[in-house]
Image: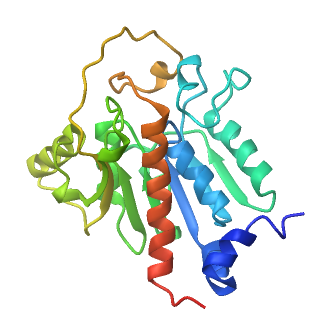
Amino acid sequence: MTNGIFNRTELLLGQNMMERIRSKRVIIFGVGGVGSWCAECIIREGIEHLTIVDSDIVCITNCNRQLMATTKTIGESKVEALKKRLLEINPEAHIIALQKNFNDETANEFNLDAFDYIIDAIDSLKDKTSLVLKATGNSVLFSSMGAALRIDPTKVRVSEFWKVKGDPLAAAMRATMRKKKLFPARKFYCVHSEEPPLPNRGTAIQDDSQVFNKAQTNGSLAHITAIFGMTLAGLVIQDICKKNTFS
């Protein structure tokens, strides 16, 4: 049943490249508006070893932008709802769903060196900074900066972390690192927007996700978060292809 799923990908990249893609191990931290779309694209492009990490449950306010969030999945674990969808795309994929947060207390529970690629789609400034500082070794890190409060898809860019401009989240992360005199072991690329953040014009309602996630609530749109997520996935595939000779 699964033989033809990746035919169009293999048509473009070749059989040998597909085998390399299948063998890579990816972990995504945060499967909300950005991470959920990244996960779907990762699976659709042939990667078969994926770990998804998020402590939240699906809430009504997620339905405007998160891939697995529908009126039928409200109340379910985000990672489990997403895993179910991903396995419907490729039943042979090996997907590990972890309903937990990455933070200073749980960091040792994750063997980051076991992964070829680490995707950071965390909202929390503290936890995001912690992951970036701990993502060393042989893994390649790609990170999402702020996708909320934007509406212009043509302003989405990819830049090295220290060269990201106009993004308050990146600026806050750099300030935290300088204050603590702790810095990433290597350079890494980020997906970000050059569009200045817009103000919230409405009122946020309380939902269950806010019990777990203490990050500020901001308005966001699916077409922006999806572009961020798919760009992160594209960076992974592009990196695999760059490191290997097409055949």
Location of the C terminus by quadrant is: bottom right
Q: Position of residue 122 (x, y in %)?
A: 41, 42
Residue 141 higher or lower than 97, as above or below: below
Residue 202 higher or lower than 158, as above or below: above
Query: Observer-nearest residue: 94 or 191?
Result: 191
Query: Observer-nearest residue: 111 or 197?
Result: 197
Q: Quadrant of residue 68?
A: top right
Query: Observer-nearest residue: 192 or 107?
Result: 192
Look at 31% across and 62% down and name the residue there: 189
Q: Position of residue 194 (x, y in %)?
A: 23, 45
Residue 112 visible in rendering: no
Residue 64 higher or lower than 4, as above or below: above
Q: Position of residue 9 (x, y in %)?
A: 66, 70
Location of the N terminus by quadrant is: bottom right
Look at 73% across and 68% down and name the residue there: 6
Q: Quadrant of residue 20?
A: bottom right
Q: Position of residue 170 (x, y in %)?
A: 22, 46
Look at 66% across and 41% down and name the residue there: 82
Q: Is residue 129 left or right of residue 40?
A: left
Give the farthest residue toward the right.
Answer: 1
Residue 169 visible in rendering: yes
Look at 48% across and 66% down and name the residue there: 236
Q: Is residue 205 left or right of residue 215?
A: right
